[in-house]
Image (cartoon, helix red, strand yellow):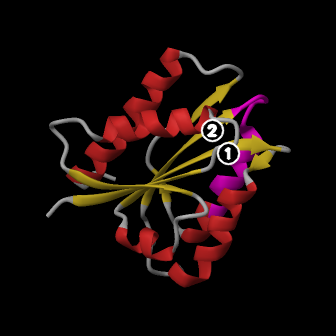
């Protein structure tokens, strides 16, 4: 039975949507067999988290923090899954005009509360999105999917 990978993201201007699409594309490697749910943060819920064997979060950095939509996802799901998602692997991608550290720090702090474990180095793209950034996002999706499938996280 295939393993399950959840991609939860928010994008307002399109940069993070392009990054999310590249992450999704990486999960579709022909040698990897995982089921993927690709959801905007306001669409995802606690059932998606319980279904998933791993999660990838994507967000812009707004005012030195993650997007309000991603924060809302965390607010809506925390107590509903508390104690049921311990040690679930996660990864993060952030598209920002700044350095992205505020958004990354806030996500990491919340993920500690969920007792998730960070499985991959985050991808932070400051400024304009380049083809090399999209390749890195694709590699993130592929490596998370492969790791979840193999059960190495």
What's the distance in space between the residues labelled 1 and 2, CA to CA? 8 Å
Identify the residue shown where x is 37% and y is 65%: 52
Looking at the rendered structure, which numbered label has been put on residue 104?
1
**Which of the 4 image quarters holds residue 15?**
top right
Question: Which percent across, then down, holds residue 78?
Answer: 60, 76
Identify the residue shown where x is 53% and y is 33%: 18
Placement of 52 over or under 83, stated as above or below: above
User: Can residue 142 be seen?
Assistant: no
* Residues shaded magenta: 96-110
Residue 100 magenta: yes
Q: Is residue 89 left or right of residue 107?
A: left
How many marks do you count on the picture? 2
Q: Is residue 82 left or right of residue 59?
A: left
Element carrying mark 2: strand
Identify the residue shown where x is 17% and y is 36%: 30
Nearer to us in this view, 119 or 92: 92
Closer to us: mark 1 or mark 2?
2
Residue under pointer 2: 94
**Labelled pair 1, 2 in contact (Cβ < 8 Å):** yes
User: Can residue 36 be seen?
Assistant: yes
Q: Residues within 10 Å of mark 2 (few under 14, many from 20)?
A: many
């Amino acid at each position: 039975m295939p393993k399950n990978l959840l991609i939860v993201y928010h994008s307002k201007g399109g940069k993070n949507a392009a990054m999310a699409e590249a992450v999704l594309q990486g999960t579709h490697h022909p040698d990897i067999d995982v089921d993927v749910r690709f959801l905007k943060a306001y669409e995802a819920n606690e059932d998606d988290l319980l279904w998933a064997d791993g999660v990838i979060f994507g967000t812009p950095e707004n005012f030195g923090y993650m997007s309000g939509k991603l924060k809302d996802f965390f607010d809506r799901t925390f107590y509903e899954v508390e104690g049921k998602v311990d040690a679930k692997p996660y990864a993060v991608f952030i598209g920002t005009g700044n350095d992205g550290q505020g958004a990354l720090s806030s996500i990491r702090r919340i993920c500690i509360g969920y007792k998730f474990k960070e499985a991959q180095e985050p991808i932070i793209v400051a400024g304009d999105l380049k083809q090399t950034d999209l390749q890195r996002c694709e590699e993130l999706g592929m490596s998370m999917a492969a790791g979840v499938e193999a059960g190495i996280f």
